[in-house]
Every structure is written in C-alpha cells, then in structure tokens.
Image (cartoon, rainbow, N blue to C red):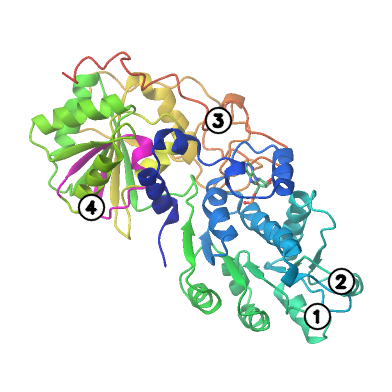
Amino acid sequence: MSFDLNDTAREEAVLNQDTPEAIQADGPSFDQLGLAPEILKAIVHAGYPSPSDVQALAVPPALSGQDLLVSAKTGSGKTAAFVWPALQRILDARLDPAKRRAKGTPQGPRVLVLAPTRELAMQVSRAAMQYGHGVQGLRIAHVVGGVPYQAQLKALRGPLDMLIATPGRLIDLMNSGAAVMGQVEMLVLDEADRMLDMGFIDDITTIAQSLPESRQTLMFSATFAGSVGGLARQLTREPQRINVASHTDTHAQIEQRLHWADNPEHKHALLETLLADRGLEQAVVFTATQRDADALAWRLGEIGHSVAALHGGMPQGRRNRVLQGLRQRQLRVLVATDVAARGIDVPTITHVINFGLPMKAEDYVHRIGRTGRAGRTGLAITLAERRDIGQIRRIERFTTQRIQAGVVAGLEPKLPPPSDKPMGDRRPGGRPGARAGGRPGGRFGGQGESAGQGYGRQPGFGEPGKRRGPGGFGGGGQGGHGKPGGPGRGGYGR
Ligand code: AMP
C-alpha cells in the first residue's frame, strides 16, 4: 500500500467527520492518539502544544501494529512518533500473560531501534528515557560503536525492554552471543537512507533475519527510492506510507507567484483572466471563509465556469459528490476553504489560486501542495491586496522563500507595490535551508515572528520544555483578514 497519508488521511478525516472544520482545525489532541496515561503524562510534562503532523499520522497506525514507511525530517517530531508506540508496546506486553518473562528465560529487548550514528542513537535513547519516565522499571540500553564493550555487555546481560543500536556494533555483539534478538516485537529503522549510505545494508539485513518474522517494522527515511525502497520491500509487510512535508521544502515543482490587486474588483478581474488560461486543467481557488467560497463559486458559475464550492459547512454527501466531480474532471474549478481542501489529491490540478489568504502561514504550504502532484509541475498564484502585506511576509518567513510578484498583461496594478515595515535582516530570496539555532525542517516556531527574527530564518524547534512563542505559527495572523463581512467584500457575492 502506498499513498501520501499527509493528504489521504486528511481527506478521509474530512470525509468521515461530522464537524471536520472543528476537528481538522486543531488536529487530534494527544489523548486521542491512544497512548497510555504513563506516556501521556511525559508528553504533558514536555509541554508540547499538540501532536506534530508525523505524530498525528504515524502513531495511530503504529499502535495498531501496522508496518510503516515514514518520510519525515529531523525536527518534525519523528523520534517521538516511534518512541511512543514502542513504549506502548512494552506496556501492553507486560499485561499479556503469553509474553510474561519467567526467570531463567531470555530477556532480550522487545523493541529494537537501529540508527546510523552514535549521536542519533544516544538522542533516541534520551528521548525514550524522557517519554518513558513514568513507565515503571523501564529498561533501555544503547550499544554504539567507538566506545568500550564492557558497559554494553553488562547492559545486555540484564533484562531489556528497548535496545537502541548502531548496526555495526550490534552485529559484533550478536556474533559474540551477547545480544539476543529472539523477543523483538518491533523493529525501528531511523534514518534508513543514511544507514545505507554508510554501508550498513548487509548488517541491517543480517540483523533483520535474526528477528521474529511476526515483528512490526517501522522505517523512517527521507526517501524510499532506490536501494532503501528495496530494503523496505524486504523488511516490511503491506506497509502504510506516510509522507510529511516540511514547511521549508522548496516545492521546486510548484512555481509560486504573487499578483498585487488594487481592490476586490481588480482581484476578481485577475482571477477571471487566470482561469481563462488554456493551460489550466483544473484549479483550486481558496477563500478565507465558507461564505466567501459559496459567493465566489456562485459568481464564477454565473460566468460559465464548471465550478463548485467545497467547505466544512456543506453536508457530507454533497462534499463527497463535489470531490468525485473534481476527480472525474466534471469540475474545472473548485472554490474551497483550507480545511475542506487539505486532503485533495488530484494530479490534474495545475493551478492553486489564493483568492483569500490563509489564516495560518502553514495553511499556505498545504494549499500550494494541492498542485504539482504525482511528479507533475504546478502553479500557485496568490492574489493579494496591499493590506495583506503583513500576511504575505509571514508566509515568506515561514517557508523561507520569497514569492515573486508578477503582473497580468492589461491588468497591472495602478498602485505601487506595498512597502514593508522594517523587520530586521530581510533578504530577497530568503535563505532556503537556513538554520537559526533550530533544527532544519522544524515544524514549530520557537520564537516566531513576534521575537523579530530576521527574514529567511528558520524558527527553531522547541528544545524540550520550550513552548511555541506567542507569535509562533499557527496562532498569528488571524485578525487581519477573512472576517466574514469584512471590508472589501462588497464587490461580489451579489
Ligand atoms: P525530532 O524530529 O524527533 O528530531 O524532534 C525534534 C524536537 O522536537 C525534539 O526536541 C522534541 O522535544 C520536539 N518535539 C517532539 N514532539 C513535539 C511536539 N508535538 N511539539 C513540539 N515539539 C516537539
């Protein structure tokens, strides 16, 4: 099974929930993930506001015993996404009489995590201890290369719940009979692509062969192409594919463009011209509110477009029919709100047009991801009025990319482009991949824009105990636009 869960899971959630706007707007909470109170307590203690995407998507299937192939970057919260289900499995095993460990029988680990480097293994080990703090008598060990064997041999002699290892050292210890792998119920490969780059393929295959066939396997890797895909096929059974995009991904296959509009009517004229483009196969036009979506769909329908609205205020059956119409290409234009459109995975969508700006900067990334799918290219066009400048710059800081402004011939704005208020070290073009003390690809704003970080900076991921700053993404930018009945809507919705 292979699909982009980031989208498909959301689509299913959107289709299956009665009140998807409310549920989807916030995502699942920690206590909806299905974890034991001991683990939840540690999560609360860590102070995280909500599960990250990879956690929300990977934890429930991992808990149900499914094999997973997960693409998520460091900084996405991926360690917790496998450590929490691993701890849950350890707790469950303790309650299972069939798995009770009698004295004198082998007491090898129930969970084995393989990591490419000593540093990563230690980091996983620290995370496991942090999240497993409330699990009574939890026994975790790590065995890594480059350090004396003595302490590791001792750790392996005692009973173990979780073992974290680099492949080379583990093979040595297995060959000497010190590491017993016959009780492993869950195998995790962290940064599998890196392990292969480092030449661990044979070690990993040998280790996997010594594990029970009934085990669950979770593979984390930036890519599943090439040899890592081959390894995934070899090690997993009917795996579920989870793909979590990072907000700093360059989206190289999606051209992003910005058109300044002088006023709402100018914006409508721009939209109508863009929709007349013959190169446009299908488009999703985003509005900020459900009311705007209905009004705009009606207006576009009046001028002859095959168009429908899609938002969470519509009955479920109608929403399903609209999505079907889009997939079957009966609709050329879909006018949607953020939440309703999140799961749409239709490869023939060539254009995403932001008619109303997203409430949250991260929604911009979800929006543009509706195009450029399945190896195709796409065009994401944002129509903005001068008052939207703050939100545009917030989006640019979030993605660390500048959206190039363009003009539509004959519809050039009469007003000059809006100027920025001074905001620190701004650089056109941003600094893709730049770090600011945080981890690359981090999802959560550390200080966020309110702390005045320079343009192009990557908001740092919360170190343990650090919460999102008040200006972090997800909370900001809500007052500036999209209020039903706000200024500037008078020109349409007749
Ligand atoms: P990782 O992607 O596993 O390297 O995670 C990097 C950092 O994310 C760690 O410092 C964790 O403490 C932090 N983290 C993990 N889950 C969350 C979450 N749900 N919200 C905020 N931070 C988190």
Dot label at residue 112:
none
Q: Which mark is residue 173?
A: 1
Which residue does the image show at 44% across and 55% down from the upper left? 5
The amino acid beneath tag 3 is: Asp
Q: CA distance from mark 3 to mark 1?
A: 52 Å
Q: What range of the chain is rendered magenta?
A: 330-351
Find the distance from the CA under tag 2 to the CA under tag 1.
9 Å
Mark sitting earlier along the chain (4/3):
4
Disc sitting over residue 152 in the figure: 2
Please state the horizontal and vertical placement of residue 375, each as a whole percent of the image. Answer: 32, 60
Task: Classify the position of the N terminus by image quarter.
Answer: bottom left
170 left or right of 384?
right
Q: Is residue 436 above or below residue 414?
A: below
Mark 2 crowd level (few <14, some 14–19, many ≥20, 10 Å Cα): some
At 82% from the left edge and 78% from the top edge, which residue is drawn? 106
Identify the mark nearer the N-term, 3 or 1: 1
- The foreground one among 175 and 162 is 162
Q: In terms of depth relative to the viewer, which is nearer, 94 or 248?
A: 94
Secondary structure at numbered mark 2: helix
Name the element at disc 4.
helix
Residue labelled with disc 3 = 425
Amino acid type for the residue under numbered disc 2: Gln
